[in-house]
Amino acid sequence: MKSDWKDLVGIAICLVPLTASAALNIFACEPEWGALAKELAGDKANIYVATTALQDPHRIEARPSLIARARSADLVVCTGAELEVGWLPLVQAQSGNSRIQNGQPGLFEAARHVALLEAPQRIDRAQGDVHAAGNPHIHLDPRNIAKVAAALAERMAQLDPGEAAEYRTRGKAFLARWQQASARWESAAAPLKGMAIVVYHKNMVYLSHWLGLREVGALEPKPGLPPSATHLTELLTNLARDPAKAVVYSAYNDPRAAQWLSERAKIPSVALAYTVGGNDKARDLFGLFDDTVARLSAVMK
Ligand SMILES: [Zn+2]
């Protein structure tokens, strides 16, 4: 009888790692892709999100903890378009994981599945930290999320064929809910069309493009450079001629420059979550867009 019991324990011990290794190990570079992966994979994946909404996505370091996580990843989901150029290549190289190298199906770059805005005619580093492939901050247009979702569900199906039907079903269900929500956001945001805003960094261009907002200035003198007194004063002078309704910045930005301009130009400063986790309403992708549209609409009321 005793040996039977031992056999059972042996089986139980074997079952646990088998179940765990069957799930897709996903390493998401940014919270928006972690949230999307969760929508599409549900409990079929273990999802690790490498960064938070309170971190500047341009300034991430290839920490040992990230390398350790990348080692066991089946699928790395990132923005691409050079957003992670400062850290991801090092993480890929140090991970020793052949599945997530460039050109492998284990590396999914969201920016490859949408049309990029602001692709420069020529690269001039004197213009600041310009993204050579085009603006990589693609996730604040829900139409981009839909395109990325369709491609990502297919990639998951390719990498985990046993659960392919599940990813495709979940993908379809997500897209149906997303279309409905997008229509709701678009009708709620219709009055925002033409609204002039000052941004902190050029990370809202897809949001502006989607809702028809007009960006009349940026707090950064050049992309990636911190706001300077000279630039802010100049911006204030420009706003006297071409007024804005709000100064919009992201949860990860230092709010001081936005507050400075807000007080002097007598327009509200609006902190947007920018991505999932940026505030307590933006708990998932739906919450992110609900909250973004609500905060911008509050300015126009
Ligand atoms: Zn940027």
Image: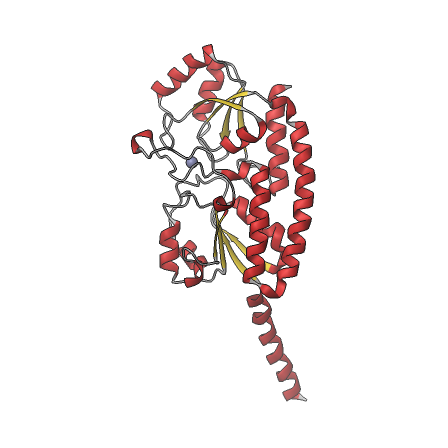
Please state, as top left, top right, bottom left or bottom right, where the C terminus lies in the image: top right
Instruction: Name the outermost residue toward the top.
Output: 241
Residue 16's image quarter?
A: bottom right
Q: Position of residue 134 (x, y in %)?
A: 42, 37
Name the residue at 39% across, 27% down: 220
Where 254 sits versus 246, above or below?
below
Q: Position of residue 108 (x, y in %)?
A: 49, 52
Name the residue at 52% across, 42% down: 114
Tell me if I can see residue 280 in this picture. no
Asked whether 174 or 54 is in front, the reply is: 174
Residue 21's image quarter?
A: bottom right
Where 269 sits versus 119, above or below?
above
Q: Position of residue 4 (x, y in %)?
A: 66, 86
Asked whether, in this view, residue 23 is left or right of residue 91, the answer is: right
Ligand 1, seen in the image, is in the quarter at top left
Asked whether, in this view, residue 290 is left or right of residue 70, the answer is: right
Instruction: Name the outermost residue toward the front.
Output: 121
